[in-house]
Amino acid sequence: MDRYTGPVEAGPEVEEFANALDECLSPFLAPAEKKERLLDLPRRYYENALRRLATKKPKRVGGSHDDIDMDIDDADETGSALSADETKRIEGEIQTWDLVRRLLPLRHAALRANPFDEGQHSRGSGDLLRDFLRRNPVAQERHAVLQWLQTNAAAGPDIDTMVEDLQKNADRGDVIAHGWLHTRSKIKLRKSMTGWSKLLECQTPSIAESHLNSDGAPLVTNLDPDAVTRQDRKLEPQDEYFERAIWLGCFEHLRRGSNLEEIRDWCQERTEMWRAVSMSAVLFSSDENQEKIDAAPESLALWRRMCYALARNRVSDQHERAVYGILSGDVSSVESVAKKWDDYLFAHYNALLRTQLDSFILGKCPADVASNLTQSFPVFDSVQFHGNESVEKRLMRSLEAKPTIKDEAQEPTKALQASLIANDTGHHLFQQGLLIELGNPTKSFTAAMVGDELAKHKYFSLDQHDGLRLVTHIYILYLLMEQQDADDNLPTEKQPPNWRFTQECIVGAYAEYLRHASLQELIPLYCSIVEAPRCYKILSQNLIHEKEHDQRLIQLKLVKKAGIDVLQFVQEQANLMYHELTIDLELAHRPPPEIHFRIVDAGRSTSRQGRAIKPDFFGEEEDAIETKDEHLIRSIEWLALVHEKWPMVLSMGIKAYKYFLTHMHLNAARQLMRRVAFSDILRGLMEQDEAETPQIEDVRFWEDQLERSNILDGKPEQVISDARNFRDLEAIVAALDSLETIASLVILSAEMPATNRKFWASVGDGIKAAKDNMQPLLKGWLVASIAGKH
């Protein structure tokens, strides 16, 4: 069933995606080269999406994704601006392909060069993080996801812009350095008024009651960084805003994966270098310029536990606690400032990775030191909290259940990203295919039963064309990489046998979209991904709409280029169209209708004219035929384009004629007679020897034709029978057509003057044609076929 009401638009990216995929499917590629190209495909799709966004929003892309060499200044700034929804959609696609390009090589890397020489495993590199990741594939994936989340965050507003409001409330103009200005002034004022030059807390025991800030709260007496916590006192309100601005900036740098140099520069600009130092022990950067971690393992383990204690300090600002929460791998303190799905996922993945790293670091410590650290200083153990089995799947389900982010988590793009991270892509694609199948009237019983439990809003609908393109290519990559791993004797994901059939609905829906976007030439490429015989069905349903002879020939070349059996395709197409024509009768268990066919009027005959022939007994509109009839005729035309299939043209033509005539679809029968003429079939067979006269009643003639066409499974006796029947059925339709023409001419002649030579000449031609077309009916019409049955 056609699920589109009209043509749809498609951007250039549709063809660009197809071309990139086509380069990966060349039959001339060696297996290793094919795998390399497939692994590189997500990068090409990622950069394609980046360029599309850059065309409309050059500054945004240039500032957020600097790993692609792109001259943003050359972007087409004259193009129409994107709406907020369009921008969000493309950004979601960018993020998805970025995620895939990071995870795919890690999950299918057996034949790729290992960036770390296996020979070095026995000795350390001097970098604890590098050694840890090299030995732990699970940690490698989590680190890749963490870097992806950091990159996504870096696409947000500039950090200086984010702290701007807090900076204004700090009441210090454009001064962003020199610490707590207002608190310092208050302390100096107190000292000058009392003539005291030493520490204020040493001045008098009643200092706590008399030294207050402008809000009346006890004010710190020192300016060292831990004064607020140590003295349990406050700053001046303006400096509180300044402090919050600093911690917000530090948090954003950690959240975005800024490297130590960037953090140091930011803090130095504000004369707050101690903050950069306190965060520098173990930083996870978003880029490959990861800081080397070479401190003593026991120092790193202790540092993490001190950070955890600060993260759990309820007196501190929430962003200060979140900073130390990131550094220690705490979840609750980081979640307290989380706003989006990415933020919550970051909190958990950061905690998981730091917990794993902490276990690795403790393993490098002397046993007594490690025992003392773990017993003396508590720290959040994310691995124990989540468990080891199916961590990612359970984490995604828990995030989806959070009320604050539930709607975002169930958006189609986010749900797809979650399945990729949780390595649950196969199930997600099954559910996506299930949603598409539910929109088909011929959906399977299983789909109808399971469909009620499907959260449909989590998957792309057919009118979300970019989402459909995205998930189609995700499925193709997923499938091809699984096939490559199977060919390399590597373990592959086991899934229920019915899943692939349902997943292939995604490709079928995308092929239908391509047809409505007038990109039929891309359909064979995508159908080559689908298993036979379903690939033939998808091809048939979409290419049957092609009317032009030359375009059909081009499509057959593309089908062959895609590695699909052309002979099998045209055969399956004809069988499918005939099946769809007759399926309603088969389902209803009804026999063909009884024929009550009359072509003469019921009145009495006259001595001069006899009985009059009914006018327009074929139908008032000559070209009006049902869609299924038209498709069957087109499928026979497709058959006729493939020389080796001429015997099936005859046999399928007979089936079509029988159906059309027994069901009184006379216009369809006439169209078949005109468009697939028996004489044209013979002419095609005799092209090699035009001087030879076809002996259609001689079985040896058909033996020769089968041999010339290299058709080994054809039987000459069956072919000669089909040829006779096809010719005879065509003859009856031609005769009926001539009679209808004469009936129309008789009506017109009553009003036509005898002087209209042109009209009367056409009458003469019509009568001659009727006589010629009647001759086959007078010479044993279908007798041979009837006799053969007895």
Image: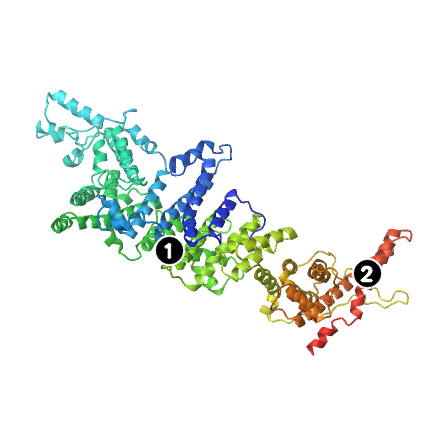
The residue that appears at 48% across and 65% down in the rendered structure is 445
Mark toward the start of the polypeptide (1 vs 2): 1
Residue 255, picture quadrant = top left
The quadrant the N terminus occupies is bottom right
Q: Is residue 219 above or below residue 705?
A: above
Q: Nearer the viewer, residue 784 or 707?
A: 707
Q: Which mark is residue 424?
A: 1
* Residue 667 position in % (x across, y down): 71, 60
User: The disc labelled 2 sits on which kind of residue?
Assistant: Ala
Q: Is residue 389 above or below residue 85?
A: below
User: The disc labelled 1 sits on which kind of residue?
Assistant: Asp
Q: CA distance from mark 1 to mark 2?
A: 69 Å
The quadrant the C terminus occupies is bottom right
Q: Is residue 483 above or below residue 700?
A: above
Q: Are marks 1 and 2 in contact (CB under 8 Å)?
A: no
Q: Which mark is residue 769?
A: 2
Name the mark nearer the viewer: 1 or 2.
2
* Residue 321 position in % (x across, y down): 23, 40
* Residue 6 position in % (x across, y down): 59, 49
Q: Is residue 153 left or right of residue 700?
A: left
Q: Is residue 352 left or right of residue 720?
A: left
Q: Is residue 467 left or right of residue 283?
A: right
* Residue 503 position in % (x across, y down): 46, 58
Residue 283, picture quadrant = top left
Dot 2 falls on a residue whose secondary structure is helix
The residue that appears at 72% across and 77% down in the rendered structure is 787
Q: Which mark is residue 209?
A: none
The residue that appears at 39% across and 38% down in the rendered structure is 65
Q: Is residue 165 above or below residue 352?
A: above
Q: Residues within 10 Å of mark 2 (few under 14, many from 20)?
A: some
